[in-house]
Amino acid sequence: MKRIGVLTSGGDSPGMNAAVRAVVRKAIFNNVEVYGIYYGYAGLISGDIKKLEIGDVGDIIHRGGTMLYTARCEEFKTEEGREKAVAQLKELGIEGLVVIGGDGSFRGAEKLSELGFPTIGVPGTIDNDIPGTDFTIGFDTALNTVIDAIDKIRDTATSHERTYVVEVMGRDAGDLALWAGLADGAESIIIPEEPFNMDKIVERLKRGHERGKKHSIIIVAEGVGSGPEFGKKIQDATSFETRVTVLGHIQRGGSPTGFDRVLASRLGGKAVEILLEGAAGQMVGIKNNKEYYQSISAALSEKRELDLELYRLSQELSI
Ligand code: ADP
């Protein structure tokens, strides 16, 4: 393989740039040319493709977002769209592709490999919801953004003796809520994977209040329902003054943490390594602090399990 491509797709996440840099530099180190595809699969179809040199990925390791931009592309979900994409790649002599994105992007990568075009997936999403890797690129940064915000909310919650409900991202995965809740000592953590009992949440708040607690923080993952709805229910049930913060898109931005930069560098490098060895339709991931890879279809056929022990611990520590 003498020429490969790299693109970022779906929702952006901090650390995607570090992964692009790793792909480009690892390839060039191995005397392989790299082409950057802009705007994800949309750019693959339209031919928005440019050769990248070592310097093109300089000064991006610390930046959030993605220098290749990202997009969602309905046309790529059609056979015709994917054939156009492969034709663009072949015209430029590109022989393999690295796709940095979430599970949707991985399904696209798998379909490209089925068309005979070797493609490797690198997990980039703040949700940490991809089976087959302990961590996704961007999760740690988003977690620290949430922690930083909750630390600030806690100051004002204490000053005013209020209950705060904080809605964090996570449609199907409660990792961000769970880790942030543990890191911030939240009273209750409401996540999509585990049923919640409103009576118990209220009871715990009242117990804390009786003990003289100055504030309470409840974290809700967006997939379970809206923060404002929970806030109203809690205020009605406890009559404690309750405020709600929806953190929204600040969770997706910002400079990647050291952990995410290193993870992105490791996984970007690994993706190039296996692509050059002849792998196709695989995703790279991290398991027990070692890079590894497995087929995208096998990874996505598993259901991603939340760490229930961690959830239980969070409950034990917030008595
Ligand atoms: P993410 O990668 O963050 O999960 P999406 O689910 O929006 O984001 O997927 C990103 C893009 O990947 C889509 O816009 C589409 O172009 C492509 N994609 C998603 N699912 C499929 C699929 N089943 N087949 C082919 N391409 C897909």
Image (spheres, helix red, strand yellow):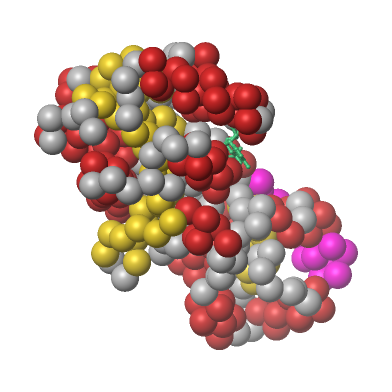
Near-viewer residue (74 or 289): 74
Residue 99 against residue 289 in the figure, above or below: above
> Could you tell me which residue is drawn at 52 percent across and 14 percent down?
46
Q: Where in the image, quadrant-wise, is ligand 1 located?
A: top right
- Part of the protein shown in magenta: 233-246
Say left or right for 303 vs 275: right
Left or right of 42 in this view: 289: left
Compared to 255, does 221 lie above or below? Answer: below
Looking at the image, which is closer to me, 26 or 243? 26
Occupied quadrant, residue 48: top left
State the image coordinates of residue 42 (x, y, percent, origin top left): 54, 22
Point out residue 226 in the picture as x, y percentages from the top left corner: 76, 52
Residue 107 visible within the image: yes
Q: Which of 229 and 9 lies nearest the eye of the viewer? A: 9
Dividing the image into 4 quarters, which one contains the N terminus? top left
Q: Does the magenta stretch include residue 240?
A: yes
Label count reads: 0
